[in-house]
Amino acid sequence: MAINLQKGQRENINAPKFTVGLGWDTNNTSTGTGFDLDASLFLLGENKKLISDNHFIFYNNLESPDKAVIHSGDNLTGDGAGDDEQIKIDLTKIDDAVKEITVVVTIHDADARRQNFGQVRNSFIRIFNTDTNEEILKYELDEDFSIETAVEFGRIYNRNGEWKFEAVGSGQREGLEKFVSIYQ
């Protein structure tokens, strides 16, 4: 049975292979332009910086060098029920240097389209066992990010050999570039 997390809550993952599913709905009538939300992952070392540029997983780099992290690709509309984007993670293959995986969702061309997360609803991140499809945990964003164009949904981190998830729910206005500058 899945655990529904609150902001700041942490939970053990306890699965060597799991999938991160992200979903959202948008209010397309608010700007007259469709929304394109993008999931990105930053694979960080002990120093909380990217291991290398190839450890930044997003729509233009779908796989980590060790093939332990594989992004399903860019969903340009977010239409339909369930996960809009998925990332498969195999901890049995992950580079030993990776100590944390930060999961970020951003709005593509947010400024030009005059869009923000205040126009996004039903946002969630969930983690499920890749082999059994059993949902391990879910975190639903319940805050109103009325000016933010990027949100760190959560982080997966290694603590004493155990992988855990922390529900972060932290937004900012400067888009993906801000996260890249933080983690590079």
Image (cartoon, rainbow, N blue to C red):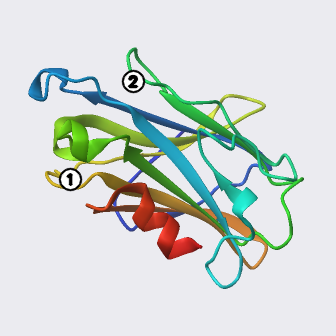
Structural distance between the alpha carbons of marks 2 and 1: 19 Å
Q: What residue lies at 47% left-to-right and 54% top-to-bottom? A: 104
* Secondary-structure class at tag 2: loop
- N-terminal of the pair, mark 2 or mark 1, is 2
Residue corresponding to mark 2:
78
* Residue 158, label in figure: none
Say whether residue 17 is left or right of residue 87. Answer: right
Query: Which part of the image, by quadrant, shows the N terminus?
Result: top right
Say whether residue 139 is left or right of residue 148. Answer: right
- Position in image of residue 172 (x %, y %): 29, 63
Q: Is residue 184 above or below residue 81?
A: below
Crowd around label 1: few <14 · some 14–19 · many ≥20 (10 Å): some
* Secondary-structure class at tag 1: loop
Q: Quadrant of residue 5?
A: bottom left
- Position in image of residue 59 (x %, y %): 59, 38
Q: Is residue 102 above or below residue 145?
A: below
Q: What residue lies at 22% left-to-right and 36% top-to-bottom? A: 113
Residue corresponding to mark 1:
143
Say whether residue 48 is left or right of residue 69. Answer: left
Q: What residue lies at 65% left-to-right and 30% top-to-bottom? A: 72
**Residue at the bottom extreme of this rendering:** 47
Q: Is residue 152 above or below residue 69?
A: below
Mark whose residue sits in front, 2 or 1: 2
Crowd around label 2: few <14 · some 14–19 · many ≥20 (10 Å): many
Residue 154 in view of the camera: yes
Say whether residue 42 is left or right of residue 45. Answer: left
- Tag 1: residue type? Glu
- Position in image of residue 125 (x %, y %): 46, 43
- Tag 2: residue type? Gly
> Looking at the image, do the residues carrying marks 2 and 1 touch, with CB atoms under 8 Å apart?
no
Q: What residue lies at 17% left-to-right and 37% top-to-bottom? A: 119
- Position in image of residue 93 (x %, y %): 89, 53
